Image: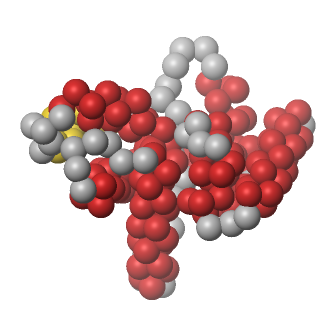
Amino acid sequence: MSLYQCETKEYIVELSSDKDWTQWAAEYAPRLLLFARQHVAESADAEDLVQEAMIESWRRQGDDTPPPIAWVYTTIRRRAIDQARAITRRKAREEETGRMNEQWFAPEVGADEDKARIQEALMKLNAEQREVLVMKIWGGLSFRDIADVMDIPLNTAASRYRYALEAMRNTISE
């Protein structure tokens, strides 16, 4: 049995190769959580998305080795889209949660103002640019992996990244 932590939640996954999975989860879980946070309003929902995607990807892999990371990003993205569709159907009954108030970065001493400016600049990007930027910078994916995850051409992924960086620079320098 393998136990790993992601923010405030502990996840338990039954695996035979604990060492591989423990290392894999320790390396990728924070990146996946950051990616999932841009799709949902609450941190707890992002943690649930990551856990479900990791388990689904592990099952799809069919053996005890960790799955390709792009699979997990794709699974998170697809599950988030499904969840967004369900929320849209209920949106008339519910008020929108204050997504802008949700912190994406763990608090550290000293750099609060910079983090706030970065978070504000991220939120000003359109969803496609923000998604590519998070996958590239914080997720460490290649443009090929990003293109596969988003089901877009490689050049489109690269240009969205370029435009996102330019927009971030402009917003932060204001």
- Residue extending farthest to the top is 110
- Which image quadrant: the C terminus? top right
- Closest to the observer, 6 or 62: 62
- Which image quadrant: the N terminus? top left
Is 125 situated left or right of 135 in this image? right
Measuring 41% from the left and 79% from the top, which residue is drawn there? 86
- Closest to the observer, 174 or 144: 144
Measuring 68% from the left and 26% from the top, which residue is drawn there? 113
Residue 30 image offset from top left, x and y in percent: 43, 35
Q: Is residue 36 visible?
A: no
Residue 160 image offset from top left, x and y in percent: 78, 55
- Closest to the observer, 64 or 24: 64
Residue 26: quadrant of the picture: top left
Residue 14 image offset from top left, x and y in percent: 12, 44
- Residue extending farthest to the front is 63
Measuring 78% from the left and 51% from the top, which residue is drawn there? 158
Residue 55 image offset from top left, x and y in percent: 26, 54
Q: How is the image coloured?
A: secondary structure
Instruction: Give the mark count.
Output: 0
Residue 126: quadrant of the picture: bottom right
Measuring 58% from the left and 37% from the top, which residue is drawn there? 140
Is 88 situated left or right of 23 in this image? right
Q: Is residue 73 visible?
A: yes
Is 136 situated left or right of 6 in this image? right
30 to 77, vertically: above or below = above
- Closest to the observer, 117 or 159: 159
65 to 78, vertically: above or below = above
